[in-house]
Image (cartoon, rainbow, N blue to C red):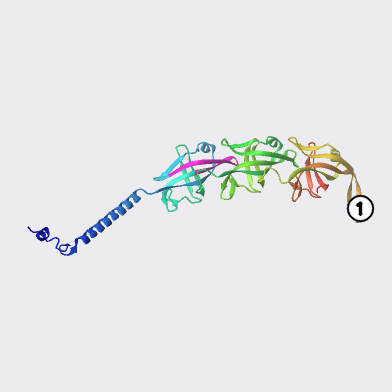
Amino acid sequence: MKSMKESFGIIDDEGNLFGVINIIDALVVVFIIAVLVAGASLVLTGDGGSSSAPTTGTTNVTLDLGTQPEYITSQISIGDSYSPSENADLTITDIYFTPQDESTRAVVRAELSAPSSGETIQYSGAPPRYGRQLEVLTETYSTKGTIRDVGGGSELTTTETKVVVRANLSETDARRLSEGQPIRVQGREVATIESVTTYGTNNPDKKTVFLGLTLQSVTYGEQQAFGETTIRPGASLSLPTEAGLVKGEITRVGATTQRGQPTTRDVKLQLSNVSPLLANSISPGMTESFGGETVARISAVQRQNATIVTRGQDGEIYERTHPINQDVTFTANLSVRETDTGVTFKDQTLQQGRVVTLDLGTVTINATVISGYR
């Protein structure tokens, strides 16, 4: 009986397939082709899956919504969401309200979810850039905001910032302010009055008030902001208080009291060439006080006829005694603050020749510093 090799001639005596290629080599070639086909199939399948289901990424942004009316701010809540397009979602994760003049400024933290694009995302066709405006449309309100920060956590970075603010108020409004009063916006406490120092002015109906405040400020980079105000000396600040809207200027950052150590100083002051009516209205024991705090107390008073300088008909200069007017010299115990640069009274440096204002209740005077200021 003939063998299979002889019958069909497929494999010869030397193990060659059709007398051309070794059977082992043929099996290796078939295996390699199978591997290549399988690999190509996986690559093609993977590409098809990527194009149909892009990778989704998320990032957090800070949106400044600007000033908003009460009917908008009352509707903004954590968890509010908006989807401007397919595969793009915005969700509010934190809220920050501050006063701005007669309105409320709203800042929110939001999570954006959208297709990934390199190291960022493509939210509604573009990456979340600084300065870009985004809409927020819900079932109850519609608004838009400007991106002021990108990245970071889901909550706004806030901190307590201590400042001193100087404001000019009516006497009635000044009396409505006191330590410990909270300042609220939309029911949220945004600041606390830590100290109140009030001084008289040339106008008996007006007071200069120094408010020590703790502000709930928000962080943008290395800066602290309260509403639209970047917190720094000289910046303007508006606060809705029990005395109404208080507009003032920041004089100090990092503390709630004026600079220097509080103390008292006996200072000699003088009024020159004043009427007898004014001269006689000043007496020992008179004080400038407000809210139980005494700013100045007069302890001694001396009066004498005023000396004036006149020019005679001959052109010469003569020193004469005024027949009516008087010079008044008095000592006042002043509440001052000692600083590294000198002694201050009512936030002004005391120097010889400096004019200080004292509201003594029945009379307001502008007296010149003579001595005792050092």
Task: Tell whether 345 sits left or right of 307.
Answer: left
Which residue is drawn at the image coordinates 29% and 55% (left, top)? 39
Percent x, y of residue 1: 7, 57
Percent x, y of residue 237: 63, 44
Percent x, y of residue 9: 12, 61
For the residue pair 328 and 226, the one nearer the viewer reads as 226
Query: Total of numbered circles in the picture?
Result: 1
In the image, the segment drawn in magenta is 89-109
Look at label 1 and name its amino acid: Tyr
For the stretch drawn in magenta, the main secondary structure is strand
For the residue pair 320 and 311, the one nearer the viewer reads as 320
For the residue pair 306 and 184, the one nearer the viewer reads as 184
Badge 1: residue crowd in 10 Å (few <14, some 14–19, many ≥20): few
Which residue is drawn at the image coordinates 70% and 35% (left, top)? 175
Q: Outermost residue toward the left?
A: 1
Above or below, 45 relative to 15: above
Query: SS of the residue at dot 1?
Result: strand
Above or below, 70 relative to 23: above
Q: Outermost residue toward the right?
A: 314
Residue 99 shown in magenta: yes
For the residue pair 171 and 217, the one nearer the viewer reads as 217
Which residue is drawn at the image coordinates 63% and 41% (left, top)? 214
Q: Which residue is mark 1?
A: 318
